[in-house]
Image (cartoon, rainbow, N blue to C red):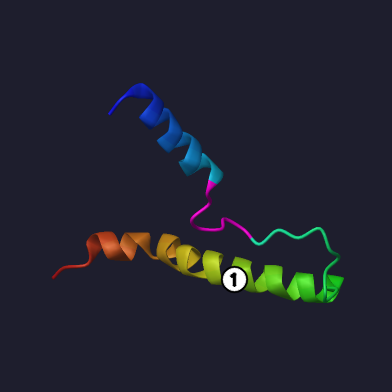
Amino acid sequence: MSLPTVSRLFRSALRTQLVPVANVSAKPAKHHVTAGEQAIAMTAFFVSILAPSSWILAHLEDYKHKKH
């Protein structure tokens, strides 16, 4: 392969987007999310992430001393 062929290959690869990264739109949102809905969603995210890790950290000594 010569250099111009490789250059054309890279240029076409940069021009074509095979998988869309994000669906970005300049239009306003179709559904307005209220502050209450945001609070509920953030609480659910925090609980689903922090509850299991808190449980593990709270019982770490039990896991260390567990005999099989």
| Nearer the observer, 25 or 35 | 25
Residue at 70% in and 58% down = 24
Quarter residue 56 falls in: bottom left
Q: Horizontally, is 2 left or right of 50 in the view? A: left
**Does residue 6 sit above or below 52 in this rendering?**
above
31 with respect to 6 (left or right): right
Q: Position of residue 13 (x, y in %)?
A: 46, 43
User: Is 28 left, or right, of 8 in this rendering?
Assistant: right
- Residue in the foreground of this view, choosing between 50 and 66: 50
Q: Position of residue 65 (x, y in %)?
A: 24, 62
Q: Position of residue 14 (x, y in %)?
A: 51, 40
Q: Residue at x 37, y 30 (%)?
A: 6
Q: Residue furthest top?
A: 3
Figure check: 23 above or below 14: below
Image quadrant in which you'd find residue 55: bottom left
Q: Is residue 15 left or right of residue 9?
A: right
- Amino acid residing under circle 1: Val
Query: Could you say whether the residue bearing mark 1 is in a helix, strand or loop?
Result: helix
Q: Is residue 9 above or below residue 53?
A: above
Residue corresponding to mark 1 = 47
Work out which residue is located at the far left of the displayed protein and give it: 68
Nearer the observer, 35 or 21 = 21
Q: Residues within 10 Å of mark 1 (few under 14, many from 20)?
A: few
Residue at image coords 77%, 70%: 38
Image quarter of the C terminus = bottom left
Taken as a whole, is the magenta stretch helix, strand or loop? Answer: loop
Where does the N terminus fall, quadrant-wise?
Answer: top left
Q: What residue span does the magenta drawing correspond to?
A: 16-22
Number of numbered markers: 1
**Where is residue 31 drawn, in percent x and y?**
82, 76
